[in-house]
Amino acid sequence: MKKLLNIAILGATGAVGQEFIRLLEERNIPFNSLLLLASAKSAGKEIKVKGKPYVVEEAKPESFEGIDIALFAGGKISEILAPEAVKRGAVVIDNSSTFRMDPDVPLVIPEINAADIKKHKGIIANPNCSTIIMLMALKPIYDLSRIKRIVVSTYQAVSGAGKDGIDELFGEAEAQITGGKYVPQILPSAGLPKHYQIAYNLIPQIDVFLENDYTKEEMKMVHETHKIFHDKEIEITPTAVRVPVVRSHAESIYLETEEDLTKEAVQEAIKKFHGVELVDDIHNQIYPMPLDTSDKTNVAVGRIRKDLYHKKGINLWVCGDQIRKGAALNALQIAEYMIEHDMI
Ligand code: 3JN
């Protein structure tokens, strides 16, 4: 019989932490003990898991004593606490960008590169949500023919910026309707000097700009794709945009393959790929939309069509819940894989 595990969730009160808990219940993952950790500010809160109350504790290095798997929801705290948890014998699955590009840390989407998990030295990184959603749609195509080039535009929901992002959208929408005033303070990014209204608007900036004129979010998609696909030659041009959607990111993806693929072959490959759903019936107006993929496990792919001019060019429209498959579910699938393969 497999050993029952001691699991810790760091960031248990945030959106990703809450999704971890929902998924632990939904997927009926067995555990011996569950420790809910957060910052001092959230310590003392009570959260029910499988009907049993748990009190959130302040996360400290000692918290990880005796823990087998630590699920880190994200944030700067990972840099300090992940090595501390590993020192105490835990395997950390980390949702922040801190370790993603570290050559000693596997960066994993289980449906794509689960085999990389075995190279871990204590930490396994969960990719950025936009990367996960894009690569879930692209992997079945890549398996038919190598992808040479990707031009992607994201349409990212405000919940990607946390609860404050959602509050800002609702606050601005309400002010518009009631004739009130709402001063944006969060988007595009709380730490920046300027903030813009997201309600009835689009903001073509997610995170800060880098030297090369791309944003950090955009460059995460480039570097992480190269690492997950083990293919540094793929040419990727991303544009990341914040949209006034509450939950579930969308992406318009143009790609060029090495071989000439038919639309039907692409549709068939997507249909067969675990974790992806083909939502593509234009004659009946069926295509993926964020409202339909919110709280759903699968990434939805539709509007599949060949480029008008380039024989090897294909367009896709993709939607996926960025808190679920884009964060908590992907991390939990890594844990499930390790449990199944006796790696913990
Ligand atoms: O804005 C979004 O839609 C996704 C945000 C992701 C994010 C936000 C703050 C810090 C990340 C991430 O997962 O890459 C990070 C980070 O860990 O760097």
Image: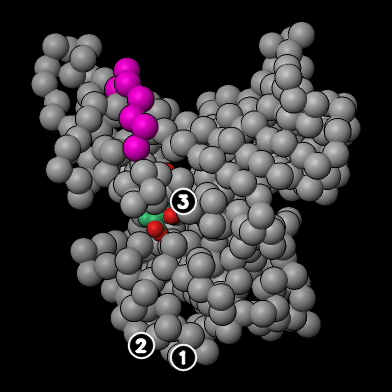
If you read the primary sequence from the N terminus, does the residue marked by circle 1 or circle 2 appear first? 2
Q: How many badges with numbers are in the image?
A: 3
Left or right, residue 259 beside residue 112: right
Distance CA(mark 1)–CA(mark 3): 33 Å
- Residue on which the image places disc 1: 88
Q: Are marks 1 and 3 in contact (CB under 8 Å)?
A: no
Mark identifier at residue 62: 2
Q: Image quadrant for the N terminus?
A: bottom right
Which label lies toward us, 3 or 2? Answer: 3
- Residue on which the image places disc 3: 219
Q: Residue at x 82, y 49 (%)?
A: 143
Crowding around mark 2 (Cα neighbors within 10 Å: few <14, some 14 to 19, many 20+) is few
| Image: magenta residue range | 199-205
Front-most of residues 41 and 262:
262
As shown in the figure, which amino acid type bears the numbered disc 1? Arg
Which element carries disc 3, helix, strand or loop? helix
Q: Is residue 188 above or below residue 228?
A: above
Which label lies toward us, 1 or 3? Answer: 3
